[in-house]
Image (cartoon, grey):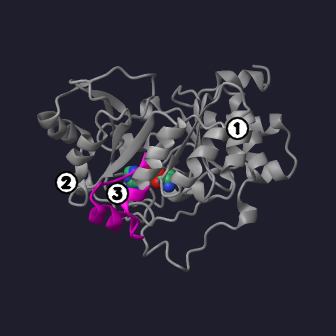
Amino acid sequence: MAPAATVTDHTQLADSRGRPLRDLRISVTDRCNFRCTYCMPKEVYGRDFQFLERSQLLTFDEIDRLVRVFRGFGIEKVRVTGGEPLVRRQLEKLIELLARQQGLDLTLTTNGSLLRQKARELKNAGLQRITVSLDSLDDTVFRSMNDVDFPVARVLEGIEEAERVGLKPVKVNMVVERGVNDDSVLDMCRFFRQTGHILRFIEFMDVGSTNGWRMDRVVPSRELVERIGTVFPIEPLEANYRGEVAERWRYRDGGGEIGFISSVTQAFCRDCTRARLSAEGQLYTCLFATGGTDLRAPLRAGASDDELATIVARTWRARGDRYSEIRTAETAKLQKVEMSYIGG
Ligand code: SAM
């Protein structure tokens, strides 16, 4: 009989499809100051919506401790997300704690609304890079997509400030929804070319169960590659590492890099090495999961690092998720966890 697994054995951790655990996305809040129609539609996330109470959220010390436990498995990259992470008070304190963990690739995804004010303190706290979501440069389109009338100009100021303080390269994520903002794609290319920022197009996904997803609203990355390529010739680049989410391309004239995240039309489950931790400490092994594993209860009940590691290892070993490879119109209707809760 094989000896009982120890924490050190966990560094060899692989799921039931042989995928290692490499990245951790941490949602620090389920709240957001935007109501993007494809993510937190107002009809669902209205005044009466019950967000998590403060006491339910993992504290920064609890997150820091869990990250240390995860690092025992070889986690190299942590992305702080939400909800909108910058609405969590004193987020820079968490960044400071995580940045003390040697050798961690630490980044954050934000809607950019509070970035102008926060970029400097995030950088000083030890944040290395940043991803900003921006779905259009057309103010009318953007305001109606974020559904809180937030102007493009303030997000652009946030991006500028991030660059000024050295949170580079800035990645800019644009979710493309047919008939909503696909007309904005070329303007976004034109604007971000030659800036050093990396624009990435995300296929509209059926995350959660409230965003009214339909396949005919998805603009396949292949189509975008063609549309962009006829105006700005582009060519593919090698991936930086196995399991990289975005397919990398560059402008042939040296205008810089762009990326395509094609989780609907070119599923990348085979190489998915990401775990997700919700703001209240549920561990999810897939963005499209219908359930998670509670880490907060054992954590608050006094579990040792070794005990926590054992729960993580058990959960990861049992992981067989490959939702994007088996997606159908029927699976899209499943009660999947919402992206604002699990973290994008
Ligand atoms: N509030 C932050 C932000 O706006 O970046 C972080 C959380 S947000 C859930 C993370 C990313 O998920 C954003 O780039 C957002 O556009 C993307 N996203 C949300 N819902 C999506 C969907 N249905 N399909 C594709 N991307 C989505």
From the viewer's perspective, is residue 338 above or below residue 12?
A: below
From the viewer's perspective, is residue 152 above or below residue 284?
A: below
Q: Element under label 2?
A: helix
Q: Residue at x 48, y 58 (%)?
A: 113
The answer to whether the beta carbon of the residue marked 3 is less than 8 Å from any atom of ligand 1 is no
Q: Position of residue 265 (x, y in %)?
A: 29, 41
For mark 2, does the 10 Å Cα neighbourhood hold few (<14), some (14 to 19), or many (20 or more) residues? some
Read off the residue under disc 3.
330
Q: Is residue 219 visible?
A: no
Q: CA distance from mark 1 to mark 3?
A: 40 Å
Q: Which mark is residue 98?
A: 1
* Left or right, residue 305 beside residue 256: right
* Amino acid carrying mark 3 in the image: Glu
Location of residue 58 (image quadrant) = bottom right
* Pointer 3 with pointer 2, Cβ within 8 A: no
Does residue 144 belong to the magenta stretch? Answer: yes
Return the residue nearer the eye: 286 or 42. Answer: 42
Read off the residue under disc 2.
183
* Amino acid carrying mark 2 in the image: Asp
Q: Element under label 3?
A: loop
Q: Position of residue 87 (x, y in %)?
A: 60, 60
Hey, which residue is sitting farthest front in the picture?
Answer: 164
Does residue 116 belong to the magenta stretch? Answer: no
Indicate the quadrant containing the N terminus: top left, top right, bottom left or bottom right. top right
Badge nearest the viewer, 1 or 3: 1
* Left or right, residue 268 beside residue 251: right
Q: Position of residue 124 (x, y in %)?
A: 65, 39
Q: Residue at x 34, y 39 (%)?
A: 199
The answer to whether the beta carbon of the residue marked 1 is less than 8 Å from any atom of ligand 1 is no
Q: Element under label 1?
A: helix
Magenta residue span: 132-154
